[in-house]
Structure formats: C-alpha cells, structure tokens
Image (cartoon, rainbow, N blue to C red):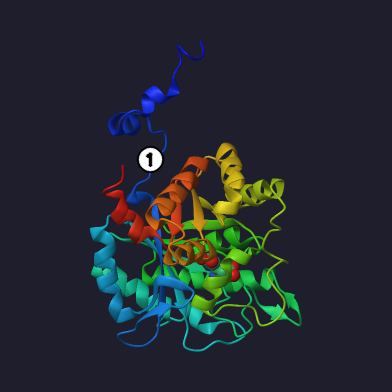
Amino acid sequence: MSFPTVRLRRLRATPTLRDMVRETMLSASQLIYPLFVVHGRNVHEEIGSMPGVYHHSVDRLAAEIDELSALNIPAVILFGIPAHKDPIGQENFAEDGIVQQAIRAIKAANPAILVITDVCLCEYTDHGHCGLVRGNEILNDETLDVLGRVAVSHAQAGADVVAPSGMMDGMIGAIRAALDSAGYPGVSIFSYAIKYASAFYGPFREAADSAPSFGDRRTHQMDPANAREALREAQLDVEEGADMLMVKPALAYLDIIRRVRARFDLPLAAYNVSGEYSMVKAAAARGWLDERRVVLETLTAIRRAGADLILTYHAKDAAAWLQSWE
Ligand code: PBG
C-alpha cells in the first residue's frame, strides 16, 4: 500500500499520538554528569570555555549532589585538578588526593549517587601525557602499574566504578587484576574503549589543565578516520573484563556508536564532550540556536544511535527540560 491510502502524517497529528509512537526515550536516569574538583575552600568558579560548568572545591560538592538528585540524575564522573603535578602524577593515587576527598564527600552527602572516576594520568603529570614518558615516547606497560594503583586508590576511597580513559593497551586487564587482588572485585570498569584523537576535547583541556606540553595524543587515541579498528578496541576490552563500554566523542561518531551497539551486548555509553557542549553554548549565547531544543534533539540522537547512557555537561539543563518536553 502506498499514498493516498498510507499517510504517515496521521501519526504525527497530535502530541499524544506523537508521544505514543516515539521510538527513542530520553530520561534523566540515563545521564552522567561530569564534575571538576579542585583544592581550596568555597570554590565555585566558572570555566571560561564552558559556560555553566564549574570548578568545585570539595566543601561545595554536597550542594551540587543535592541538585543532581533533585533532578533524578543518578551518576557523576569525577575529574580532579591536583595541587602539584610531577612526572608520575603522585596525587592521582594519594589517599588525600583531590578525587579521593571528593569521593568521600559525595558518598557522605548521598551514598545512592553512583560515583564514577576518570582514571588517567594527564591531569596529574607535569608533561600532561596520559602515560609515563621517556624522552618523547609515551610508555605503555610501565603506565599500566600506575593505572592499577590509581584505580585501587579510587576504590579504597569508595568509588563504585572506575573509568580508564588513557587508551593504553592492556589497561582494562591490568586494572581488573589490580582491583581484584586488592579486594575490590565488586568495583566495575567502565572503559573509554573507543576514544578518538579529537579536537573536540579542547575546552576540557582548559578545564582540567591537561594539555600535553609536547606532542599530542595520536600514538594512543584513535585516528578519526577508522571504524573497523573501533570494534577491535572494544573486543579487546571486553575480553579483558570491561563491564561497560564508551565511545567518545559522540556527535561526529554516531556511526561508531551504532556499530558497537550492533556487535556487543555490554551497556554502551557515549561521551558528549566539551567541544560539543561549548559549540552549542556559544551559538545559543548569540541567539543563533534554541539551546533547549538543540540539546534535547542531540541527546535523543545519541540514544537513537544506540547509546544506553550519555555523559554530558548538559545533564542538569536536560533533566530539567525533560520534565516539560513534548
Ligand atoms: C583524559 C580525558 C579527556 C577527556 C575525558 N578524559 C581529555 C583528553 O583525552 O585529552 C575529555 C572530555 C571532554 O572533552 O569533555 N583524562
């Protein structure tokens, strides 16, 4: 049958009908909110390149957590900005490190909020690289030991989930082994399995002060031109014991989300990264885009591509808007 018997506009005629035939649902329960934590007291400082996103000191976290739970956002992912940087990133696995303090404060404020921690070296090292460095080389296997120590330290402080983002080969297996032998078999690993060497991370590097002092991340992060290789990355992480997978960034990589969804049965997340956020904020500030509609359309598209969960700086706004979306 075809037109005029078939008329697809029939099912678009009223808000009720449109709601009932909607294929993709977006809800606050699928959102993960990134938090940047800094030393000091009473710090709540907006990040220049990311309007609406702040550096928080530990004493300001409880208020933030209250706000998130009122919006039904179930999870945060923590990024720490250390007091001192060094070649190894000692504060990354220090008992009183900034992330360790933040985990304890959040769990004290609300134990039901899921605490995910980013596990990488780049915010903590003086050279800004995701691994240990010898000359101009980013070392792989030597870095795995440090990643294991960081994950265990986060688990000790009370993290529910660790999210390694450094794209070192073997990082999932090394972290699983370290967690298990330290007595944390119940802590999940959320792998940034497919992370591209992307210019969309620009604003984050200002927020986390993590830009590399020389070179770039192309010897470990993926070439944006590659898709089959993404499946190999995911496969390895699954074999090494990842509990959940992530594709990052999201918007320029919706095809990758779709392919990973089709091949693997693990929960899949997409990271709607800093540059994607800042572009929308900049255009909205000039009145060039309707921020609310663009954000909800974008997040719905990421879900439609196949992501179960979305890490996004828009989480709070989106959760509030969702309560009144049609
Ligand atoms: C690395 C890390 C980065 C992001 C998350 N974890 C930056 C990088 O790889 O340079 C980027 C997130 C974003 O842009 O929003 N620890």
50 sits to left or right of 27: right
The quarter of the rendering in which ligand 1 is drawn is: bottom right
Q: Report the residue at 33% width, 60% height from top.
A: 316
Q: Can the viewer see residue 110?
A: no
Beta carbon of the mark 1 residue lies under 8 A of ligand 1: no
Q: Can the viewer see residue 132?
A: yes
* Vertical position of residue 179 compared to residue 47: above or below: above
* Vertical position of residue 12 compared to residue 249: above or below: above
266 sits to left or right of 71: right
**Percent position of residue 25, x then y:** 38, 40
Kind of element beneath mark 1: loop
**Percent position of residue 28, x then y:** 33, 51
* Vertical position of residue 258 compared to residue 321: above or below: above
**Percent position of residue 68, x then y:** 29, 62
Residue pointed to by mark 1? 25
Q: Report the residue at 41% width, 25% height from top.
A: 9
Q: Amino acid at mark 1?
A: Met
Q: Nearer the viewer, residue 30 or 5?
A: 5
Q: Report the residue at 57% width, 47% height from top.
A: 254
Q: Quadrant of the C terminus?
A: top left
